[in-house]
């Protein structure tokens, strides 16, 4: 593939973009960056004051000039953080390649993704998969955008995915896998003024080995056969007489199952778009019995369809309100034989996968469920658990807009009440305020060059008092189409 090549009868047209980000400065006053400078950033932001460099390329190319239904897709991103003259870290958060046929996509590699019905730019992050952890290596087949069910049913559309992924080696286990699938449905045409949404995602940690016989694990081995994979996929349990040698998997489901069931609706008015959504959490049988129905992520998004960019005026483009509740978890007791008492779900922790719902020691889901390394709490805690604070109430406001014709602003303000876990509750309820303000704009003298300045604070009892800044530049070029010779 080459840019600017000679056009021939066999040339095809491709989309591509290339950008390089030069963040001149990350600065903070504590041992880690403030919450909203590091959360949901795919775990590539430096912990301390640093200079960061990154570059990325994404492309989509027709495989044939005569048939544009088949396309080759791919991308990569390289991130380097320079902490000092003797400490440099290098990351590859994206490196993937695949093929696309019409609306069906297959890829292999690492790719930045989000799952769940929620706002992706101003919210707290989707509960189950927020972009808080480093992307996992995957093979995936998906329909990424809503696809109508035939020409005669444009009012009913769906999208979804089916994937296999690898967790690699973590603190307590290694060689274990992720099974993932999702299905989301839209009722209403793309152009309809009213649209309804519904769907679910299903995540399963399964297989692998442990470094010690932890929980009910024997011989340091978890069920890893193809038959076990099928049991994980269909999520049926208990598996009495089917799984032997492991008391947990033989009396329960194979693997650690979790996800959300999402619903929402969208209204397109003349000047404003309104999106309302709800993510219902499941990690045990509590949601089935409705004992944990109070838990979930609730959001409303107001989008101004005609924001002003007049000189001297401040206008809002989008406003997001969210409320996250994970306090219930079905109650403080767990009785296997009593559905109404199957509580104590211990979100993002697990009796066998002690590394919990994490990748590289970073929570995969909402960053408001915290791990031990991030919080500043003196209380006793279970060092085998990933999440030391999974019972939270979060109130969140996000908004973005324009200051005149040349400056854009974005802000996130989050207030949380934190209760620890059912097993290790906090004796008091630490309150926490985390906020971010970001400004950005174009540099007219340089085409495609953008400046960005961010300030963030943490104030409260959950995190160390902290103030941080980011001042950077982003150069984007090559966006559009180029010719490739086949």
Image: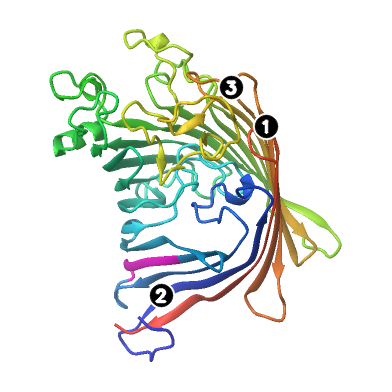
Which residue bears the numbered disc 3? 426
**Mark 1: secondary structure:** loop
- Asked if residue 91 is positioned above or below residue 421 in the image, the reply reads below
> Which residue is more in the foreground, 456 or 402?
456
Residue stretch rendered in magenta on the structure: 68-77
Quadrant (top left, top right, bottom left, bottom right) of the C terminus: bottom left
Residue tagged by mark 2? Answer: 14
Q: Earlier in the sequence, mark 1 or mark 2?
A: 2
Location of residue 405 by image quarter: bottom right
Q: Residue furthest front?
A: 86
Q: Is residue 257 visible?
A: yes
102 lies above or below 236:
below
Front disc: 2 or 3 = 3
Residue for badge 1: 461
Q: Is residue 70 magenta?
A: yes
Q: Is residue 270 at all visible to an observer of this figure?
A: no
Q: From the viewer's side, name the closer residue of 209 and 407.
A: 209
Relative depth, front residue between 270 and 384? 384
User: How busy is the neighbourhood of tag 1: few (under 14 within 10 Å), some, or many (20 plus)?
Assistant: some
Precedes in sequence: disc 2 or disc 3: 2
Main secondary structure of the magenta stretch: strand
Determine the residue positioned at 44% across, 72% down.
Answer: 15
Residue toward you, 182 or 368: 368
The vertical placement of 171 against 44, above or below, is: above
């Amino acid at each position: 593939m080459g840019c600017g090549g000679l056009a021939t009868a066999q040339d095809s047209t491709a989309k591509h973009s290339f950008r390089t980000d030069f963040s001149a400065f990350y600065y903070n006053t504590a041992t880690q960056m403030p919450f909203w400078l590091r959360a949901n950033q795919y775990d590539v932001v430096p912990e301390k004051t640093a200079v960061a460099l990154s570059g990325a390329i994404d492309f989509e190319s027709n495989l044939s000039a005569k048939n544009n239904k088949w396309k080759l897709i791919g991308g990569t991103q390289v991130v380097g953080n320079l902490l000092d003259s003797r400490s440099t870290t290098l990351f590859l958060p994206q490196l993937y390649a695949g093929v696309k046929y019409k609306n069906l996509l297959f890829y292999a590699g690492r790719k930045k993704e989000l799952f769940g019905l929620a706002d992706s730019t101003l919210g707290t992050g989707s509960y189950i998969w927020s972009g808080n952890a480093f992307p996992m290596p995957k093979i995936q087949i998906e329909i990424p955008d809503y696809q109508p069910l035939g020409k005669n049913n444009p009012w009913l559309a769906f999208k979804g995915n089916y994937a296999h992924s690898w967790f690699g080696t973590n603190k307590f286990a290694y060689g274990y896998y992720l099974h993932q699938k999702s299905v989301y449905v839209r009722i209403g045409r793309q152009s309809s003024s009213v649209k309804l949404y519904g769907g679910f995602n299903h995540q399963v940690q399964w297989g692998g080995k442990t470094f010690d016989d932890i929980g009910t694990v024997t011989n340091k081995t978890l069920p890893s056969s193809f038959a076990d994979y099928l049991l994980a996929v269909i999520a049926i349990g208990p598996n009495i007489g089917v799984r032997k040698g492991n008391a947990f998997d033989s009396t329960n489901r194979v693997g650690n199952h979790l996800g959300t069931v999402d619903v929402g609706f969208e209204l397109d008015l003349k000047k404003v778009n309104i999106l309302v959504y709800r993510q219902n959490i499941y990690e045990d049988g509590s949601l089935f019995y409705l004992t944990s129905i109070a838990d979930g992520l609730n959001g409303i998004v107001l989008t101004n369809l005609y924001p002003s960019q007049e000189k001297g005026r401040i206008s809002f483009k989008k406003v997001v309100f969210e409320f996250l509740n994970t306090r219930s978890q079905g109650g403080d007791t767990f009785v296997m034989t009593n559905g109404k008492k199957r509580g104590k779900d211990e979100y993002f922790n697990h009796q066998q996968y002690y590394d919990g719902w994490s990748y590289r020691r970073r929570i995969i889901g909402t960053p408001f469920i915290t791990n031990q390394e991030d919080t500043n709490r003196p209380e006793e805690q279970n060092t085998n658990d990933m999440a030391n604070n999974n019972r939270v109430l979060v109130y969140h406001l996000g908004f973005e807009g324009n200051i005149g014709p040349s400056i854009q602003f974005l802000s996130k303000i989050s207030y949380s009440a934190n209760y620890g876990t059912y097993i290790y509750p906090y004796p008091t309820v630490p309150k926490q305020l985390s906020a971010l303000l970001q400004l950005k704009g174009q540099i007219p003298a340089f085409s495609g060059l953008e400046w960005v300045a961010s300030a963030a604070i943490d104030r409260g009892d959950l995190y160390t008092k902290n103030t941080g800044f980011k001042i950077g530049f982003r150069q984007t070029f090559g966006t559009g189409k180029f010719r490739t010779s086949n």
